Structure formats: structure tokens, C-alpha cells
Image (tube, grey):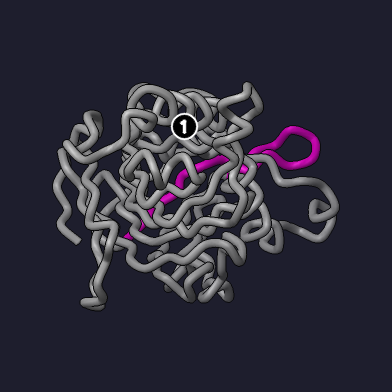
Amino acid sequence: MTVDRNSLQFDNTDGAADSCGTANLGEEPGTPPSQGSRIASAVLSPAVQLWLRSQVQQVDELKVKIEGSDRQIFSGAIPKVTAAARGAVYKGLHLTEVAIKGCGIRINLGQALKGKPLRLLESVPVTGVLRLSQADLNASLKAPLLADALSEFLLPMLPLTDREQSLKLQNSQIVIEAGLLTLSAAILRAGGTQIPLVLRTGLRIASGRELMFEAPEIEMDGELKSSDFNGFKIDFGPEVEIEELILSPGEIVCRGGIRVLP
């Protein structure tokens, strides 16, 4: 994978043939090739773009390109779809840039042309690359996916009298360095008192669906604690396949795939 602040590329690293080719953040999906489909450009691309916009809370820029012949698309088969987005917010997660690619897609085009909602007929494996800036990661800290993972990790460190309550963090900020994340926050305890907290940890792939904290250090209320939580995992579910994770100053880049279900 080539990493650049203006263009992120994903491809197969195992050398396997890829009939879909590659996609780039920053490429300009738009006009189909000369042998492409008029249906794709006139009907399907706008419909897919509208559907994608409906799946996110907001998006600053979204581009979609659909490839295939009229004959293929009329049958409900789409050989390839690529999409690139900037400034998308999905379930509270702020995604700086994302490029995705799906192949062998089957849809209910006949019904869609009659005014029915466009939908998938089969699950689709989608590959892609994501860039997450430090600013967008900090904006995502209130999203349930991140908030629940942090709560699960930090709750056992509190006194037993506080463990029955949900953990609340205030003034949370994350700094991204090469191979390292540093979280600064205040834990709000029962009665309104606050405990200053600093968590420093590496982050690496544990399995295709899991990321793992590596050698975490925790400073709580000014006291450095020896952590028994080395190897704590965040599970993204069985439909996710994480292939590469890069932490560099100010940003995270992740490459992998997800199976989109009908």
C-alpha cells in the first residue's frame, strides 16, 4: 500500500489477480469508460450515491463510479463499484478519507427502475483503505464503538465501589504518534470527583477482526500503574477483515475489507 496525505491506494499484496483493479482516495470517479453503461451513468450511479448518503450522518464529498455494460447491469449484475468519500460520519465515527471497492454485486435493478428501493440481493465483499486524522479520532471519542471499548478497558481499574456504575470520561483527547496512542482524560467518579488519567499504548492487529493494545501504560491520579491489560482486544465483528494498520504522527491508516450484508 502506498501512503500519501493526498492519495491513499489499496491493492492486493499477495500477488493474486484482481479483476477489479485498484482505487485511490483522490481519484475522480465519474465518467464510465467508452464501452460502459448509459444506465450506470444516468440511473444507477446517482441511486447508489443517494443510498450511500443515506447510510451516513454526513459526508463532505462523495464520488461513485460503476463499471459494466448495459447488458450486465440490466440483468442486475454490477462487475465493479468504486467509491471515495471525505469527511464522512458513520455511527458517530468521523472518517477523514475512505476509498472502497466492491466486485460481483447483484441488485434488484428491475424493481428499482419501477420505483422500489435499491437493495442488494447477495452479500458483497468490499475492500478499502481508511485514513483517520487525529482531529477526527478525537471527534469520534463519543461514538458508542470507541466509548464502550474504552469503558470496558478502564472500568476494572476503578475501586470496587465504583464498578457498578457506567464509566464516564471528560475532556478526552488522543495524540497519535508513530506506533503509539496517548489518551488523556478525566474519569468522573460517583459524587462528582474526577481522576486524571493518561493511557499510553501501542496498537496492532491481533486477528482479522481484532485490534490489540500492546504494552499499555496507565497513569491515574498522578500514579503510574503497572498494567495487567497487555493484549486487551477490540473486536469489530465477523464481517470485518483488517489487513494493515499504520500509526504515524497525526493519523492512522487502515487497509482491509468488510462483508456488506443485504
Q: Which residues are magenta?
A: 180-195
Left or right position of 206 against 221: left
Circle 1 SS class = helix
Q: Quarter of the image holding residue 220?
A: bottom right
The image shows residue 231 at horizontal and vertical percentages of: 52, 75
Left or right position of 220 against 35: right
Q: Is residue 86 visible in the rendered structure shown here? A: no
Q: Is residue 182 magenta?
A: yes
Count residues near mark 1 (Cα–Cα under 10 Å), then give few for <14, some for 14-19, many for 20+.
Answer: some
Q: Quadrant of the N terminus?
A: bottom left
8 lies above or below 39: below
The image shows residue 153 at horizontal and vertical percentages of: 62, 60
Observer-nearest residue: 187 or 122?
122
Q: Residue at x 14, y 47 (%)?
A: 4
The image shows residue 109 at horizontal and vertical percentages of: 55, 36
Q: Is residue 252 visible in the rendered structure shown here? A: yes
Observer-nearest residue: 132 or 19?
19
Q: Residue at x 51, y 45 (%)?
A: 76
Q: Is residue 6 magenta?
A: no
Disc 1 residue type (three-letter):
Val
Q: Residue at x 71, y 63 (%)?
A: 156
Residue with the mark numbered 1: 48
Observer-nearest residue: 10 or 102?
102
Q: How many marks?
A: 1
Observer-nearest residue: 77 or 16?
77
Q: Which residue appears farthest toward the front when viewing the image?
A: 71
